[in-house]
Amino acid sequence: MDKRLIIAIDGYSSSGKSTFARAIARELNYIYIDSGAMYRAVTLYCLRKGYIGKDVLRMEGILADIKDIHISFIYNPDINEYETFLNSENIEREIRGFEVSSYVSRISQIPEVRYRMVELQRQIGVYKGIVMDGRDIGTVVFPDADLKIFMTASVDIRAKRRFDELINKNIEIDFEEVRENIIARDIADENRDISPLRRADDAIVLDNSRMTVEQQMEWVTKIIENKINGR
């Protein structure tokens, strides 16, 4: 398996993209890049600075600071995962909270933010051997990716996954509020002016509503082997 690939995984919020991408990266010993975490990191930065909030969007502050926002992924051997760092601070837990989720779509619609994130993502992918998940990886960031997968699942399934994730992190939240947030994010992601969520023409669709991670891995392993072997 000398041929190293760029694997792009796009899809809807809470469709299991990150879990799936992490599993693939571990299996292939590739670098895993969570592009959604990058936008969440920018969102957290803006919330802390007061650049975004209810009825608040201070573009001048965001544009002035965007080049000073540095995001990195550092491997934590204790949990066998990559964690997200914002300007050298581990923010993995904070960016998964409901407040960040509520504003990340607004931040991700800002052209200058997207241009900066795409620039950083392409730099990471120069040497291939990466798995990256997001909403525009196969359409914008890496349109020539070796393998593109578009993931989806029913709204109720995705809301339950997100709800369970938050509860497991001791974050109290109402299920209907989570479900409404999922629907709102779908609408925002599909209808934004810059890099809207859509399936690349050459992407393979994976509806994992009733699939375990193990079943998904069995499905994708055969596809990856064919790609590596040129079939």
Image (spheres, rainbow, N blue to C red):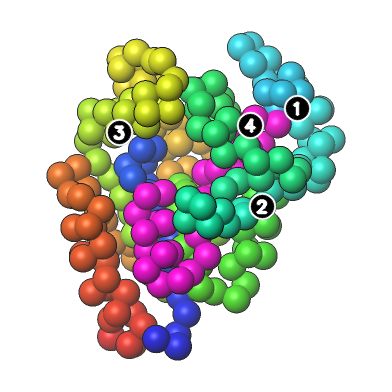
Which residue is labeled 1 in the image?
A: 59
Q: CA distance from mark 1 to mark 4?
A: 13 Å
Considering the numbered disc 1 on the image, is that residue within a helix, a strand or a loop?
Answer: helix
Task: Name the quadrant containing residue 25.
Answer: bottom left
**Amino acid under disc 1:** Met
Q: CA distance from mark 2 to mark 1?
A: 24 Å
**Amino acid under disc 4:** Thr
Answer with mark 4 or mark 3, whichever residue precedes in sequence.
4
Whether label 2 touches label 1, CB < 8 Å: no
Q: Residue 123: x percent and y percent?
A: 67, 65
Answer with mark 2 or mark 4, whichever residue precedes in sequence.
4
Mark 2 or mark 4, whichever is nearer to me: 2
Q: Residue at x 37, y 50 (%)?
A: 19
Considering the image in quadrants, where does the C terminus appear?
Answer: bottom left
> Is residue 26 located in the magenta-colored stretch of the structure?
yes
**Which of 167 and 67 lies nearest the eye of the viewer?**
167
Mark 1 or mark 4, whichever is nearer to me: 4
Which residue is labeled 2 in the image?
A: 72
Which residue is labeled 4 in the image?
A: 43
Work out whether 56 lies above or below 104: above
